[in-house]
Image (cartoon, rainbow, N blue to C red):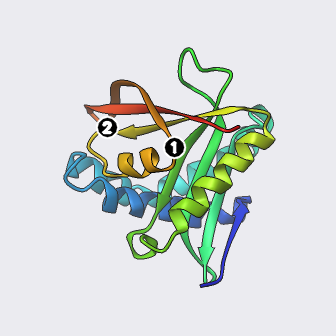
Amino acid sequence: MAYSIKEIEKKDIYDFMYVNTMSWTETYKGIIDDSFLEKIVNELEKNVERQVNLFDKYKSEDPNYKRYILYVNNESVGVIGLGDSRVDGYKDAGELYCIYLLKKAQKHGYGKIMFDYAKDRIKELGYKSMIVQCLKDNKTNEFYKHMGCVLIDSKLRKVGDKEYMENVYLHNLD
């Protein structure tokens, strides 16, 4: 299948937010509270508008914050977000903030393609390592381990009104 990955422009925000939201509902069903998942779907248009309004601010205030979309046969099916690490003790690393792929595009090698693409972009930012955070009950933890990420910590993360355990991984980019 023909695929491409591109950095988003303001006009791409709806596609980015749609894939991000729908992949959350697919990935976190049974892990995160259903009311939170329903809320993000119901607030999709509002979140798109907010992201459009913040787009230029993000670009100017944090030039390392990058978002990308994976297109397969001209349909947006995956998203990547990355930038500077937000994890204490790892400010000298880049971070893969998100990598989401719609269920219909999974099991075709696109996750690896997106992961490798993100690693290359983080290297271009000058980092030699990358942080990845993943909710403990998310089966994607196995993917990150398979890609060479090493578990370095676990911590609580608030999502909506509840807290969930999250694994923190480190990946050496050399």
Left or right placement of residue 141 versus residue 129 in this view: left
Instruction: Write the residue at 55% across / 41% down.
Output: 97
Q: Which mark is residue 148?
A: 1
- Identify residue type, mark 1: Gly
Where 131 falls versus 27 (above or below)?
above
- Identify residue type, mark 2: Gly
Q: Secondary structure at mark 2?
A: loop
Instruction: Write the residue at 57% across / 26% down.
Output: 86
Q: Secondary structure at mark 1?
A: loop
Cα distance, mark 2 to mark 1?
A: 30 Å
Where 105 falls versus 92 (above or below)?
below
The residue tagged 2 is: 160
Quarter of the image containing the N terminus? Answer: bottom right
Instruction: Write the residue at 63% across / 82% down.
Output: 74
Where 39 falls versus 101 (above or below)?
above
Number of marks drawn: 2
Q: Residue furthest top?
A: 89
Q: Between label 2 and label 1, give the one nearer the viewer.
A: 1
Q: Toward the viewer: 7 or 123?
A: 123
Query: Percent from the top left, x then y, of residue 172?
Result: 62, 35
